[in-house]
Image (cartoon, grey):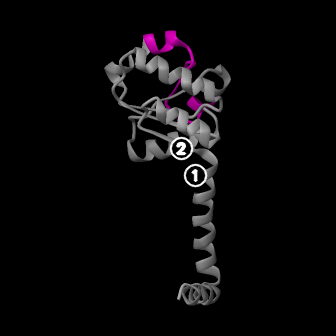
């Protein structure tokens, strides 16, 4: 799991303790995650045989595809479809065109990583700004309201 997959893993594990499993194709990374007490298995989500062994429609309810390769995400989605997976599928992408292509395949949601990261970052910036300089926030908000009139 890369940075995006790991962040998703942590967030979901916090909400659904003991119900989340991650996959990585690198044995060293799997070992590292397991040492950190993460539920991670050695597997390649782009491998059709993996999905055959996993039998996703039998025990998976949510699949989060956070692979950096758009083609890998597409391949995994097509493989899930071939295995009649009816659970929720969410994928990440780096470009808006990729998001549109993922959504056109009928998955439940696709997100542009950079748009989401920028929006989240700006929320954090705003919260820090409000805490550190409430005087400026009030002044700027007042100026913004006047320009809307």
Query: Magenta stretch containing residue 59, yes or no?
Result: no
Q: Which residue is mark 1?
A: 116
Query: Considering only vertical position in the picture, is 80 above or below 114?
Result: above
Cα separation between marks 1 and 2? 7 Å
Question: Is residue 52 shown left or right of residue 8?
Answer: left
State the image coordinates of residue 18 (x, y, percent, origin top left): 39, 36
Question: Is residue 53 shown left or right of residue 24?
Answer: left
Query: Considering only vertical position in the picture, is 63 above or below 110?
Result: above
For mark 1, give the secondary structure: helix
Looking at the rendering, the stretch of residues picked out in magenta corresponds to 32-52
State the image coordinates of residue 141 (x, y, percent, origin top left): 57, 85
**Residue drawn where x is 64% and y is 40% of the image:** 94
Query: Magenta stretch containing residue 34, yes or no?
Result: yes
**Residue drawn where x is 42% and y is 31% of the image:** 106
Q: Which residue is more in the foreground, 138 or 133?
A: 138
Q: Which residue is mark 2?
A: 111
């Amino acid at each position: 799991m890369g940075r995006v997959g790991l962040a998703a893993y942590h967030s979901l594990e916090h909400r659904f303790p003991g119900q989340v499993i991650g996959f990585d194709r690198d044995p060293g990374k799997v070992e590292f995650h397991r040492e950190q007490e993460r539920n991670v298995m050695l597997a390649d989500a782009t491998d059709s045989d993996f999905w055959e062994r996993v039998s996703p429609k039998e025990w998976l309810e949510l699949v989060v595809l956070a692979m950096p390769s758009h083609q890998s995400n597409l391949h995994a989605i097509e493989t899930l479809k071939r295995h009649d997976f009816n659970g929720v599928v969410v994928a990440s992408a780096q470009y808006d065109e990729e998001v549109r292509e993922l959504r056109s395949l009928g998955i439940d949601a696709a997100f542009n990583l950079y748009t989401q990261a920028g929006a989240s970052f700006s929320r954090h910036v705003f919260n820090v700004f409000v805490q550190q300089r409430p005087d400026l926030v009030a002044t700027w908000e007042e100026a913004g309201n006047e320009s809307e009139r």
